[in-house]
C-alpha cells in the first residue's frame, strides 16, 4: 500500500492531507468480512471524506459516487481508499475503528509527525512506517 506515499507537494501542502486505506488480509480474514468493510465505509462517510474511490464501482466522489450504492456493492475483497483534509476527521475515524475492533488492516499516509501525533492521540501504536524518498531518475 505504499503507492499513497508518492504524492507531490510541499510540506505546507500536506499539513492537512491524509490518505486512509483499509482492507482485510487476503487469504487470512477476507472471507465473510463484507459487513466489516461496510461498517468501515459507514464510519468514513459519517466523517465526510474529501474523496473516496472504489475499485468495485469504478467511481469516486468527484464522479458522483453514491455512498449507499458503494456500501451495498461491497464484497469480501473490497478495499477502502479515501482521503481527508482535516486532521480531526482522521482522529475520529481511527477512534471509531479502534473502538469497534473490526479486524481490518488500516494504513494512514501523511506527514510522519502528523500521523504519529494522531496515533498517539487515539492510543494506537504503529507497527511499521514507510518513508517516501521522492522521485529519482528519469521521468
Image: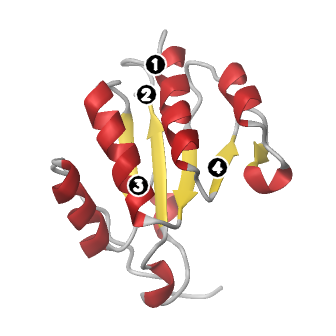
Q: What residue do we see at 72% from left, 28% from top?
A: 68
Q: In x, y percent, where is residue 113?
A: 25, 74
Q: In x, y percent, where is residue 79?
A: 56, 36
The numbered mark at residue 58 is: none
Left or right relative to 14: residue 72:
right
Question: Alpha-carbon distance for marks 2 and 1?
Answer: 5 Å
Element type where label 4 sits in the image? strand
Q: Which of label 3 and label 4 is nearer to you?
A: 3
Q: Quadrant of residue 118?
A: bottom left
According to the picture, the residue beneath numbered tag 3 turns out to be 90
According to the picture, the residue beneath numbered tag 4 turns out to be 52
Q: What residue do we see at 61% from left, 88% from top?
A: 138
Q: Earlier in the sequence, mark 1 or mark 3?
A: 1
Q: Earlier in the sequence, mark 2 or mark 4?
A: 2
Q: Are marks 2 and 1 in contact (CB under 8 Å)?
A: yes
According to the picture, the residue beneath numbered tag 2 turns out to be 24
Q: What residue do we see at 40% from left, 64% from top?
A: 87
Q: Are marks 2 and 4 in contact (CB under 8 Å)?
A: no
Mark 1 is surrounded, within 10 Å at the Cα level, by few (under 14), some (14 to 19) or many (20 or more) other residues, namely some
According to the picture, the residue beneath numbered tag 1 turns out to be 30
Q: In x, y percent, where is residue 101?
A: 29, 26
Q: Earlier in the sequence, mark 1 or mark 4?
A: 1
Element type where label 2 sits in the image? loop
Q: Nearer the viewer, residue 105 or 49?
A: 49
Q: What residue do we see at 22% from left, 64% from top?
A: 116
Q: Quadrant of residue 112?
A: bottom left
Q: In x, y percent, where is residue 67?
A: 70, 35
Q: Which of label 2 and label 4 is nearer to you?
A: 4
Q: Are marks 1 and 4 in contact (CB under 8 Å)?
A: no
Amino acid at each position: 500500500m505504499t503507492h499513497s506515499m508518492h504524492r507531490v507537494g510541499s510540506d505546507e501542502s500536506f499539513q492537512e492531507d491524509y490518505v486512509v486505506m483499509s482492507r482485510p488480509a487476503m487469504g487470512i480474514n477476507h472471507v465473510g468480512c463484507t459487513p466489516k468493510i461496510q461498517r468501515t465505509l459507514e464510519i468514513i462517510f459519517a466523517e465526510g471524506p474529501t474523496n473516496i474511490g472504489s475499485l468495485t464501482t469504478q467511481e469516486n466522489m468527484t464522479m458522483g459516487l453514491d455512498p449507499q450504492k458503494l456500501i451495498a456493492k461491497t464484497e469480501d475483497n473490497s478495499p477502502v481508499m479515501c482521503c481527508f483534509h482535516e486532521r480531526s476527521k482522521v482522529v475520529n475515524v481511527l477512534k471509531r475503528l479502534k473502538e469497534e475492533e473490526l479486524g481490518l488492516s488500516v494504513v494512514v499516509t501523511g506527514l510522519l509527525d502528523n500521523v504519529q501525533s494522531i496515533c498517539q492521540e487515539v492510543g494506537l501504536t504503529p507497527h511499521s512506517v514507510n518513508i517516501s524518498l521522492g522521485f529519482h531518475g528519469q521521468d
